[in-house]
Structure formats: C-alpha cells, structure tokens
Image (spheres, rainbow, N blue to C red):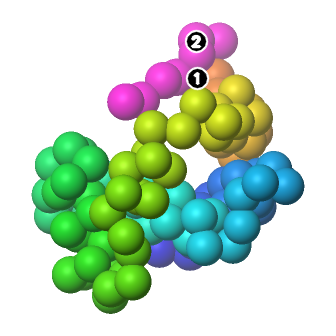
Amino acid sequence: MMILHDLLSKLKNEFYQNKKNNDERAGWFVYTLIAIIVPFTSAKTSNLLRCLKSLFGFEAIVKKRYYRFMASPKIKWPRLWACLWRQIPDRLSEDRLILAV
C-alpha cells in the first residue's frame, strides 16, 4: 500500500503543478485513479462520481463540475505519463522492455 501512496502522491504533485488546478481537483484526480484501480465500479464517469461520493465521502462534488473536470483537455497527460514512467525502477528484463496494462 505504501508503493501506491508514494506513486499517487507524486502524480498528485505533478497534477498540481498547473496553476489552474487547485488542491480540490488534484484530490479528485487521485481518488478517481483509486476508484479505477479498486474493483468497486466500472470506469464510466457517472460510476466514478458515485464511487467518490459513497466510498470516499466527497458529498460536495457538483456533478457538472466533475464532468467538466473529467473532460478537460488541459490535464497535462504527457507530464503525468512521464512521472509514472520515472517511477518504474527497472524497466528491462533480459534486455526486453516490460509493459503492463
């Protein structure tokens, strides 16, 4: 669990680097990733919002704001992917690249 905490903390920090993103949305981002990882619900946006409300206690999330957040083209995915890539300690095994989905 500590590995997941470290990884999500680093992703949250990368996400937070954008001046338009506040701490609230950075939290939404991390808990959305957890909701996708935990086999509690499917990754449809409506189910993720329901999961955030019931499982993690985010009662004050306005549906329209969360949908707008999830559809935002301003999320810096290349920077987040680079952060995630840097977290893989040893990417090669017998000189072959290891990938997992």
Question: Element at badge 2?
Answer: strand
Task: Please give left or right for residue 58 compared with residue 97 in the image.
Answer: left
Q: Residues within 10 Å of mark 2 (few under 14, many from 20)?
A: few
- Of residues 97 and 40, the one nearer the viewer is 40
Please name the residue that numbered disc 2 is placed on: 96
Vertical position of residue 28 compared to residue 60: above or below:
above
Mark 2 belongs to which amino acid? Answer: Arg
Magenta span covers which residues?
Answer: 93-101
Horizontal and vertical percent position of residue 81: 65, 33
- Of residues 68 and 78, the one nearer the viewer is 68
Task: Please give left or right for residue 97 compared with residue 34 in the image.
Answer: right
- Does the magenta run of residues contain 57? no
Please name the residue that numbered disc 1 is placed on: 93
Q: For residue 73, say whether it is visible.
A: yes
Question: Element at badge 1?
Answer: strand
Which residue corresponds to the image point at 45% horizontal and 47% vertical from the top-left?
68
Horizontal and vertical percent position of residue 94: 60, 16
Magenta span: chief secondary structure: loop
Vertical position of residue 97 compared to residue 61: above or below:
above
Mark 1 belongs to which amino acid? Answer: Ser
Task: Please say if the residues under marks 1 and 2 sit with CB atoms less than 8 Å apart.
Answer: yes
Q: Residues within 10 Å of mark 1 (few under 14, many from 20)?
A: few
* Marks 1 and 2, how far apart at CA: 5 Å
